[in-house]
Image (spheres, rainbow, N blue to C red):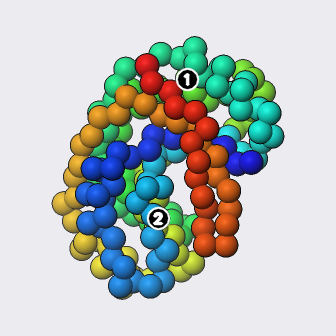
């Protein structure tokens, strides 16, 4: 079972992010709106019996509601089209504490630098015309929202893309 910690986007935010979608670009596989999230930490492929230990480790953490700003778009070399999350000290602090808690219970995490974003589409190949269309569509996009929760999510790979399920929700 693949597990990750994430801030799921509220429905009203999902609906506003939908304005960035260009379904006419068939080479992009758009993320279903209900799956839009900001990954705080990818925990990896773990046994389901690890869930209780994760929940127990995280239950100790306290945090305040965080205001997040979504803006700017881009592509990772891997073909992920993303919507950026403005730098936020509270989010980075929460992410650092979550990673520390996971390492304390023996979960090995990726060593990548945390770059908060929302994956809105995937593609096998990024072309200049597609990148230009997306840049025009997302020009000036700016959205603020507050969140007071994050979730432990599981991911199951299916032929038509991943399916996510909430395993636990954490609210201060």
Q: Is residue 26 left or right of residue 59?
A: left
**Along the horizontal axis of the image, is 20 left or right of 128?**
left
Depth check: 87 or 149 in front?
A: 149
Residue 67 % position (x, y)? 29, 33
Residue for point 43% across, 31% down: 149
Q: Residue, x 57% and y 78% (percent of image)? A: 124
Task: Answer yes or no: is residue 75 visible.
Answer: no
Q: Which mark is residue 31?
A: 2
State the residue position of label 1. Answer: 97
Quadrant of the image occupied by residue 18: bottom left
Q: Is residue 21 above or below residue 95?
A: below
Real-space Cα separation, disc 1 to disc 2, in angstroms: 28 Å
User: Which picture quadrant has residue 163?
Assistant: bottom right
- Camera-nearest residue between 88 and 146: 146
The answer to which of marks 1 and 2 sits earlier in the sequence is: 2
Q: Is residue 98 above or below residue 5?
A: above
């Amino acid at each position: 079972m693949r597990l990750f910690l994430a801030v799921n986007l509220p429905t009203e935010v999902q609906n506003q992010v939908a304005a960035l979608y260009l379904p006419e670009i068939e080479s992009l596989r758009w993320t279903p709106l209900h799956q839009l999230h900001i990954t705080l930490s990818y925990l990896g492929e773990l046994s389901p019996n690890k869930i209780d230990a994760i929940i127990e480790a995280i239950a100790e953490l306290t945090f305040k509601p965080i205001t997040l700003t979504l803006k700017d778009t881009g592509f990772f070399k891997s073909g992920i089209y993303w919507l950026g999350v403005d730098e936020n000290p509270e989010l980075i602090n929460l992410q650092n504490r979550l990673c520390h808690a996971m390492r304390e219970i023996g979960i090995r995490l990726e060593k990548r630098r945390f770059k908060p974003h929302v994956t809105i589409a995937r593609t096998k190949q990024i072309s200049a015309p597609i990148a230009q269309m997306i840049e025009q569509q997302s020009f000036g996009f700016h959205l603020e929202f507050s969140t007071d929760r994050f979730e432990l999510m599981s991911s199951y790979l299916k032929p038509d893309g991943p399916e996510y399920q909430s395993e636990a929700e954490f609210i201060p």
